[in-house]
Amino acid sequence: MNSLLRRVPSYSIISNNSLRKLCSTDAPDFNMENPFEKDKQQCILCKQNIQVDYKNVRLLSQFQSPYTGRIYGKHITGLCAKQQDKLEKEIVKAQSAGLMATYLKEPVFLQDPELFDVEKPLRPHRF
Ligand SMILES: [Zn+2]
């Protein structure tokens, strides 16, 4: 116990002013940003700030199965609930307006790049 006490440095060696300076630099900065904060996850439409529109059939058909014409689910497209809901509404609107095919993907759009991997859904599904 005594040897421990002896090892503790005496602060009388450091002047009061320099001690104050030391304390001010070592004090935690509570106003700094959290360096461990993760990046906000955003879906592809929110990230690029794309407004889904029923007239943009080329974009809408990228979320449609080429075999059945079905709209891919949220677990496959990776969209947020808001954008997925809007997308589905716009696709139905485009289909009822006769701009978009219902049971297949327009062959013109078959070569379009894929926005997501259909084989690897974000969440596993039953089938
Ligand atoms: Zn989103």
Image (cartoon, grey):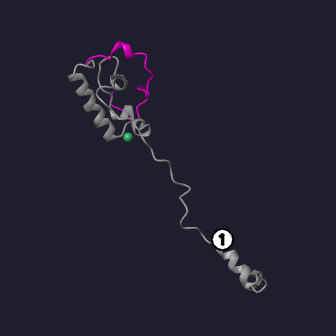
Question: Looking at the picture, how far across and down is residue 41, in whole percent?
Answer: 45, 44
Mark 1 surroundings: few (<14), some (14-19) or many (≥20) residues within 10 A: few
Quarter containing the C terminus: top left
Answer with the quarter of the image where residue 16 lies. bottom right
Answer with the quarter of the image where residue 8 lies. bottom right
The total of numbered circles placed on residues is 1
What residue lies at 40% left-to-right and 40% top-to-bottom?
Answer: 46
Question: Looking at the picture, how far across and down is residue 35, in whole percent?
Answer: 56, 56
Up/down of 72 relative to 43, above or below: above
What residue lies at 43% left-to-right and 19% top-to-bottom?
Answer: 112
Residue at the extreme left of the image, as rendered: 96
Residue at the extreme front of the image, as rendered: 55
| Prevailing secondary structure of the magenta residues | loop
Q: Give the magenta range.
A: 102-127
What residue lies at 40% left-to-right and 31% top-to-bottom?
Answer: 121
95 displayed left or right of 120: left
Residue at the extreme top of the image, as rendered: 107
Up/down of 4 relative to 36, above or below: below
Residue pointed to by mark 1 = 26
Q: Nearer the viewer, residue 120 or 85?
A: 85
Q: Nearer the viewer, residue 102 or 123?
A: 102
Is residue 115 within the magenta segment?
A: yes
- Which quadrant of the picture is home to ligand 1? top left
Question: Looking at the picture, how far across and down is residue 22, in whole percent?
Answer: 70, 75
74 displayed left or right of 115: left
Q: Nearer the viewer, residue 25 or 4?
A: 25
Is residue 28 within the magenta segment?
A: no
The amino acid type, in three-letter code, at marker 1 is Asp
Quarter containing the N terminus: bottom right
- Mark 1 C-beta to ligand 1 under 8 Å: no
What residue lies at 38% left-to-right and 17% top-to-bottom?
Answer: 109
Answer with the quarter of the image where residue 67 lies. top left
